[in-house]
Image: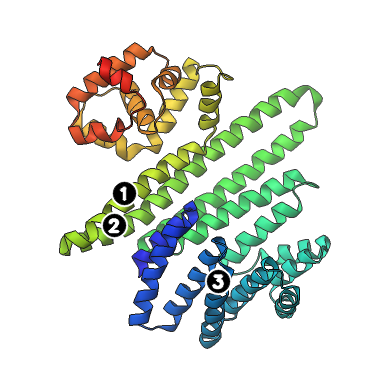
Amino acid sequence: MLVNYDLGYLYHQKGFYRQALLHYREMQKYVDAHPDTLDCYITAYSMGNIFMLLNRYDSAYHYYQGAIVLARQLKNESYERYILRQLNLHARLTGNQVQAQWYAEELRATTDPYLKAESFQELGNTDSASFYFLKATKDPQISTRAMAFQNLSQLYRKAHPDLAFVYADSFQIYKDSFYALRQTDKIERLTAAYRQEIDLQKEEADRRENAIYLWGGIGITLLLCGTGVFFFVQRKKRRYLLLEKQLVANRLAAIKEYVAEQNRRNPEEWSAMYQEIAAIEMQTLIGQFQQTAWQKRINAIQKGNGKPFSKKEQAVFQKEILALFDELVKRLQAEHPQITKDDLLFCLLSLMNYPTSLIAACIGCKETTLRTRKHRLKEKLSKETFGLFFHSSINQQDTEEV
C-alpha cells in the first residue's frame, strides 16, 4: 500500500491525475482485503481529492462522506476539519450555497486559527484573516504552518510585495519539511539536518535582505543593489534546487529499495514498476532543470531573442547542469573515463531533446563539431547508454551524415 500511495502522490504532484487514480484504486483493493480505520481514511480522502481534480464531483462527495465518518471514528479533529474544508469547497464548486454556508459555519465554530482565518477570508475581512493566519504559523502541524504562510503571501502580494516574498519563501521551506517528515527514519534524520540548514539560510537571507534594504535607500547605489539582489536570488534558487533534488532522490531511493527487493522475489510482477520509478526519477530531474533561469535563456535563444552564452556563462551553466544530473554523469564517466565536460554537457542537453543548433549555442561550438563528438561517443559508450542520451529523432539528419 505504501508503494502505491507514494507513486500515486508523485503522479498527483506532477499533474498526472488519471495515473494517480490507478494507484489509489490499488490502495482501495488493499484496504478492502485488510480493513484498518487509518488506512481506510487515507484512501478515502486521496480518492476524494483526485476526483475533485478530475471534476467528478459526485464521486468526490461519496468518498469525502466516507472519510469524515472514519475521521470521527479515529476521534481526530484535524482529519475531520480537513474533510469539512473539502466538503465546503465541493459545495461551492457545485453551486450549493446553502450546504456551503452550513459547512462554513461548522468550520467557523472551531478554535483552529487557520480555519477561522479561512472563514474571514471568504467573507472579505482581510485584516481578521491576516491576524488568524499569523497565529496559525505557530501551529504544531507543519502542513498548517505552510498553508498559513502561503495565504499570507497571497494577502500581501499587492500591498506589500517584499513581505509577500518572505512569506512565500517560508511556505516553500515548510512545504519541503512536511514532505520530508513522511519518509522513513533515515529520511527523517536527513530532514532534521535539512531544516537546520534551512534555518541558517533563512537567517543569512534576512541579514542580506536587511543590508539590501539599507543600501536601497541610497540613490547612487541602486544599480549595485539591483545586481546584488539578482545574484542573491539566483544562488538561493540554486541551493533550493539542490536540496529539493536531494529530498526527491532519497524518497525515490527508499521506494526503489523496496521495489528492488520485491523484484528479486517476483521479477515478472515488479520489473515494470521498477522501470516506472526510474522514468519518474528522470522526469523529475528534467523538470527541476526546466524551472531554472537557464531554461528561460535557452528559450530566448531558440526564439531568436537572446544572445548565445558567453564564456563565463558557459562555465557556470556547465557546472550547474553537471551537478544536477550527477548520477547520469557518473554513469557516463564509468563507461568512458576520458570523457570531457563538454561531451557530458552535450549528452545531457541531447537527453532533453534540444536541437543541435541550440546545443551548439549553449556549448559555444559549431554544429559540425557536435556531429563529430556524437560519432566518437557512439564508439565509446555502450549501445544502451548511447540510446538513452541520443534516443530522439530531432537530429536524424545529423545521424545520417555521421
Secondary element under disc 3, as helix, strand or loop, is helix
Secondary element under disc 2, as helix, strand or loop, is helix
Looking at the image, is mark 1 or mark 2 nearer the viewer? 2
Locate residue 300, reporting x and y percent: 56, 24
Locate residue 389, reporting x and y percent: 30, 32
Vertical relation: 141 (above or below) 296: below
- Numbered marks: total: 3
Q: Earlier in the sequence, mark 1 or mark 2?
A: 2
Looking at the image, is mark 3 or mark 1 nearer the viewer? 3
Locate residue 153, reporting x and y percent: 70, 52
Looking at the image, is mark 2 or mark 3 nearer the viewer? 3
User: Which residue carries the number 2 mark?
Assistant: 273
Q: CA distance from mark 2 to mark 3?
A: 27 Å
Return the mark for residue 167.
Answer: none
Q: CA distance from mark 3 to mark 1?
A: 31 Å
Secondary element under disc 1, as helix, strand or loop, is helix
User: Which residue carries the number 1 mark?
Assistant: 278
Identify the amino acid type marked 1: Ala
Residue at 39%, 31% (x, y): give it. Answer: 353
Marks 2 and 3: CB-CB under 8 Å? no
Identify the amino acid type marked 3: Ala
User: Which residue carries the number 3 mark?
Assistant: 60
Seen in the image, is 83 located left or right of residue 361?
right
Image quadrant containing the C terminus: top left
Identify the amino acid type marked 2: Met
Whether residue 84 can be seen here = yes
**Residue 379's image quarter?**
top left
Residue at 52%, 76% (x, y): give it. Answer: 63
Vertical relation: 44 (above or below) 319: below
For this rendering, which residue is in front, 60 or 104? 60
Image quadrant containing the N terminus: bottom left
